[in-house]
């Protein structure tokens, strides 16, 4: 182990983080122009804060604190080992989450992956994103049973984005969350878009996990309605807007609500013969590149807010790195014990239970399992485990 944090080392780390964050904030100005502050900041009791904090923290203060604790423990591990520590964000979801209709590098997860590495590296962490959403796929019961095979065993944050393909099947959401929570990393769980699943998020928080909800109505109020309404602009005024703002919101709709907004929903290459200009799945229910950029930036701000709070936690503790890590780990152990010792499994009887009456629910929800799936993307395929070849020898690298 390395030496405990000194004030000088912590100050240097904070300075490097603030430089990386300022660089990102400047890039946002280039993309969103004069609308950056309105879209990505809020006034709370006279104080300016980023929506990366308010969209998550206000929903569950306990889960926010647990998320900050997780981040602080990662930073302390990096300091005591003297090595960059991996931090893994995995996105599970359907075709919209996978950015079908858009280019692969335009998804909100890819946007996040471009935005935050410098900020993470400043505090000793290496950020890894896994954009593993799949078209026409729900969260259960294949994917929920294959959590570790699809997403890996080292995930720190899961984002659940299966609302469109899940509907009222709350049992599949619960099963997915339980199996994800079984990972040794004790990942944070983020439920995207839909209040319908709020009860599951609250359930996981009650069981001791960092479990946050991010709903569309919150996003609309805090950020979305701050985009200029193209319906109130002339064509000349609209064309002068910054690229990431121009013709994005028409009335209450994003990339819809009028032909003007729909006209620039998809990115196009100036070369008319470019094959990607004719790509499939450009459907009305699939968001375009500006929507993905917006969400990717919201998640980026969320990550930076948790890093900032983690550094503040470390600074205010007054403890050296190893002692503080042990204290935080003991608190996490106590929280996670609530989940590991839960007797009631599950709260919602799963739909498949009647077809497998001889299998105890505790086995399905919490016992070790082995899953073979040929689905892509997945760690099982990328690591060559399924096909018994070497890592990255599958021809479908990350």
Image (spheres, rainbow, N blue to C red):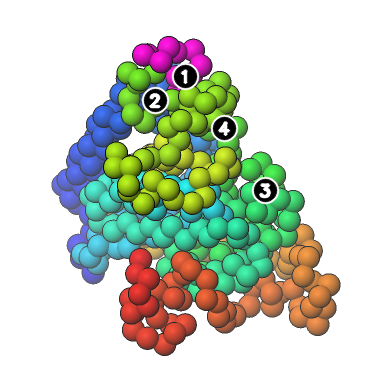
Disc 1 and disc 2 in contact, CB within 8 angstroms: yes
Pick the front one: 232 or 185: 232
Pick the front one: 99 or 168: 99
Q: Residue at x 33, y 42 (%)?
A: 272
Disc 1 and disc 4 in contact, CB within 8 angstroms: no
Q: Nearer the viewer, mark 2 or mark 3?
A: 2
Determine the main secondary structure of the stretch shown in magenta: helix
Taking the magenta stretch, the answer to whether it contains residue 271 is no
Q: Quadrant of residue 290?
A: top left
Give the spatial CA distance, label 4 vs label 3: 15 Å
Percent position (x, y) of residue 336?
56, 63
Q: Which residue is mark 2?
A: 246
Q: Which residues are magenta?
A: 221-237
Disc 4 and disc 3 in contact, CB within 8 angstroms: no
Percent position (x, y) of residue 9?
18, 50
Give the spatial CA distance, label 2 vs label 3: 33 Å
Q: Sequence-wise, which precedes: disc 1 or disc 2? A: 1
- Mark 3 lies on a secondary structure that is helix
Taking the magenta stretch, the answer to whether it contains residue 233 is yes
Give the spatial CA distance, label 1 vs label 2: 8 Å
Q: Sequence-wise, which precedes: disc 4 or disc 3? A: 3
Q: Residue at x 60, y 58 (%)?
A: 136
Outermost residue toward the front? 273
Q: Which label sits on residue 197?
A: 3
94 left or right of 72 in image: right
Q: Sequence-wise, which precedes: disc 2 or disc 3? A: 3
Give the spatial CA distance, label 2 vs label 4: 22 Å
Query: Where the N terminus falls, by quadrant?
Result: bottom left
Q: Which residue is mark 1?
A: 230
Q: Which residue is mark 4?
A: 218
Percent position (x, y) of residue 318?
30, 48
């Amino acid at each position: 182990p390395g030496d405990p944090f000194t004030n000088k080392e912590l100050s240097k780390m904070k300075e490097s983080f603030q430089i990386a964050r300022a660089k990102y904030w400047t890039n946002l100005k280039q993309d969103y122009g004069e609308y950056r502050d309105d879209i990505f900041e809020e006034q709370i009791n006279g104080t300016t804060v980023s929506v990366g904090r308010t969209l998550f923290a206000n929903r569950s203060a306990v889960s926010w604190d647990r998320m900050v604790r997780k981040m602080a423990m990662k930073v302390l591990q990096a300091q005591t080992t003297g090595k960059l520590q991996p931090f893994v964000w995995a996105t599970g979801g359907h075709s919209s989450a996978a950015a079908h209709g858009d280019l692969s590098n335009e998804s909100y997860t890819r946007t996040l992956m471009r935005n935050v590495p410098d900020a993470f590296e400043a505090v000793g962490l290496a950020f890894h994103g896994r954009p593993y959403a799949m078209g026409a796929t729900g969260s259960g019961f294949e994917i929920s049973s294959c959590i570790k095979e699809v997403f890996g065993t080292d995930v720190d944050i899961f984002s659940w984005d299966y609302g469109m393909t899940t509907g009222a099947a709350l049992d599949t959401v619960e099963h997915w969350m339980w199996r994800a929570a079984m990972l040794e990393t004790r990942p944070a769980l983020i439920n995207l878009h839909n209040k319908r699943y709020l009860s599951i998020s609250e359930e996981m928080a009650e069981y001791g996990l960092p479990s946050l909800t991010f709903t569309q109505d919150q996003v609309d109020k805090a950020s979305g309605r701050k985009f200029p309404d193209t319906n109130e602009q002339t064509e000349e005024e609209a064309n002068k807007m910054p690229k990431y703002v121009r013709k994005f919101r028409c009335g209450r709709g994003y990339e819809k609500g009028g032909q003007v907004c729909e006209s620039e929903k998809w990115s196009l290459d100036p070369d008319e013969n470019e094959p990607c200009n004719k790509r499939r799945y450009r459907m009305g229910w699939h968001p375009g590149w500006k929507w993905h950029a917006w969400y990717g930036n919201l998640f980026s701000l969320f990550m930076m807010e948790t890093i900032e709070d983690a550094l503040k936690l470390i600074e205010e503790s007054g403890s050296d790195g190893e002692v503080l890590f042990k204290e935080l780990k003991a608190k996490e152990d106590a929280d996670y014990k609530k989940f590991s010792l839960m007797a009631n499994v599950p709260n919602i009887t799963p739909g498949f239970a009647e077809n497998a009456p001889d299998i105890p629910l505790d086995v399905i929800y919490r016992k070790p399992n082995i899953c073979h799936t040929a689905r892509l993307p997945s760690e099982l395929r990328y690591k060559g485990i399924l096909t018994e070849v070497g890592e990255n020898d599958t021809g479908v690298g990350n």
